[in-house]
Image (cartoon, helix red, strand yellow):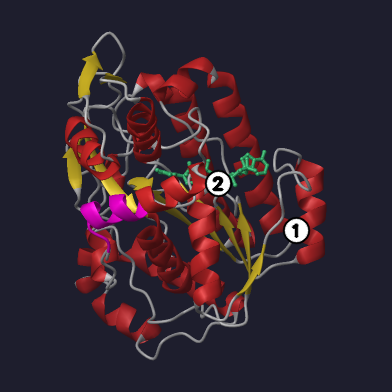
Amino acid sequence: MEGGAPAPPCRFFASALVSPACDAEALAKAQVRRAKADRALGVEPSRSGAAFFLFMAGGVGMICALMGVERQSNRCFPLSGRRVFVAGHSGLVGSALTRRLSDENGAKILTVSRGELDLRNGPAVTTFLEKERPDAVIVAAGRVGGIGANRKQPADFIYDNLMIEANVIHAAWKAGVRRLVNFGSGCVYPRECSQPMRPEQIGTGPMEPTSEPYSTAKLAGMIMCDAYRRQHGVAYINVIPAGVYGPGDCLDPERAHVVTALMRRFHEAKQTGASEVVLWGSGRPQRELLYVDDLAEAVLLLLERYDGEAPVNAGSGQVCSIAELAACLVEVTGFKGRIAWDTSKPDGAAAKTLDWTPLRQMGWNPRTGLAAGLRRTYEWFASRVSE
Ligand SMILES: NC(=O)c1ccc[n+]([C@@H]2O[C@H](COP(=O)([O-])OP(=O)(O)OC[C@H]3O[C@@H](n4cnc5c(N)ncnc54)[C@H](OP(=O)(O)O)[C@@H]3O)[C@@H](O)[C@H]2O)c1
C-alpha cells in the first residue's frame, strides 16, 4: 500500500453496502488509482482523461458511478501481441475464449493442462506464472456443476474454487500481471434478489442454500480481486455471466451445465425410444441464457477496455423458464415423448436475470438468439457423442 494510506473501501461487496451514490472526492481518488494502474500498464491515458474527469466528476462521473460504470478509455489494453494466460482453457468458457483469442486480436494464448498444473497447488501455480510472466490472466478455471453435484460435493466446490482463485490471483500479482479477469457467478446474488440483478445488490441478503459453498467461494474470489486492485493498483476485474451454454461444455452429466445436461437427457431418451424424461424441480425457475461465444466477446472487450471496481454483469436478455427451455430442447433434439417434473427435488433460485446495462453501454450486444444457439449447441453435442 502506498504511503501507508488505507485502501479505499469497497463499494460492492460489504454486507452493509456502501451507497452507490459516491461523492466526487471518492471518484477523483478512483481516477487517480486508475491513472496509476494505466501508467503501470504502459497505457496512454485517453486525451479526455484526467481533464475530463475533473470537469465532470460532479456530473457525468456521478451518473456513471450510480450505474456501476467507470469511464473508460476507448482501447486501454490492446490485446495485440499480448500473452494471455487462460486458466481453464478446456472448459466451456475457457475454450470459447481461446477460440476467440486465436480468431482475432493477435494475442498470444498461454494454456496449460490440468495434468501439468493443478491450480489448487499454490507453489506450482506461483512457479508457473513467475516463469511465464503473461501480460494478462483470465481465470476461467473452477469446479462447476448443477444442483445435484453441489449438494453431493459441497466441500469440493468450496475448496477447489477457493484454492484456484486464491492461487491464481495471488501468483498473478506476484508475477507482475497487471490485468486479470475473474468470473463471479449469478448465485452470489441474494436468493430473493429483485430482478434483473445489479452488482450493488450483492451482499444484501442470504444466497441460495443449494449452492452456498460454491457461491461463497465465487464471492470470495470476487472480493479478492477487488482487494488486490485496491491495495496494489492492479486492473483485476470481475465478470458475472448469466447461464452460459454452447459448444465446449463437459459431457459428464455431473459437470455439464443446464442446457447440455437437459440436451443429453432428451438425446438419450430419443436413442432408446423412452416415452418419458423426468426432470428435477417444478420447471418454473427463470433463467437467462448466454451463448458462450458471445460471453467470450464480452470478456475480451472488458479485458481491453474496462478497469473498474464494479463487477460487470454479462447477460443476454434471453430469459426463459426451465420448462420453456426443456420444450425448446425437445424440439431441437427430436425427442417424441413427454416431460415429467419431480417436484420433490429442489428448484434452486426462482429467478436469475442480470442487469447488463454497463456492457450494453460499452457497445456490446449478444449476437446469438436462443433458438440458433441451441441448434448450434446440439450440432456440436451430436457430433461429440457419436464420435
Ligand atoms: N458456465 C456458466 O454458466 C457460468 C456462469 C457463471 C460463472 N461461471 C464461471 O466461469 C468459470 C468457467 O466456468 P465453465 O462453465 O467454463 O466451467 P467448466 O466448463 O467446468 O470448465 C472448468 C475449467 O476449469 C478447469 N479446472 C477445474 N479444476 C481445475 C484444477 N484444479 N486445476 C486446473 N484446472 C482446473 C477444468 O479443467 P478440466 O476440464 O481438465 O477438468 C476446465 O478447463 C468458472 O469460474 C465459473 O464459476 C460459469
Q: State yes or no: residue 87 in magenta.
A: no
Q: Residue at x 39, y 39 (%)?
A: 260
Q: Hey, what amino acid is under mark 2?
A: Glu
Q: Which residue is mark 2?
A: 387
Q: Position of residue 198 (x, y in %)?
A: 25, 47
Left or right for 334, reference 251: left
Tag 2: Cα neighbours inside 10 Å, few (<14), some, or many (≥20)?
A: few
Residue 58: name its quadrant.
bottom left
- First of labels 2, 1 by sequence position: 1
Q: Give, as a single range, the part of the protein colored magenta.
A: 368-377
Q: Position of residue 110 (x, y in %)?
A: 68, 65
Q: Classify the position of ligand 1 by quadrant: top left, top right, bottom left or bottom right.
A: top right
Q: Position of residue 56 (x, y in %)?
A: 25, 77
User: Does dot 1 land on a helix, a strand or a loop?
Assistant: helix
Residue 215: name its quadrant.
top left
Rendered view: 60 above or below 144: below
Rendered view: 331 above or below 112: above
Q: Residue furthest bottom?
A: 47
Q: Is residue 226 visible?
A: no
Left or right for 134, reference 323: right
Left or right for 222, reference 286: right
Rendered view: 250 above or below 307: above
Q: Residue furthest top?
A: 344
Q: Which residue is mark 1?
A: 129
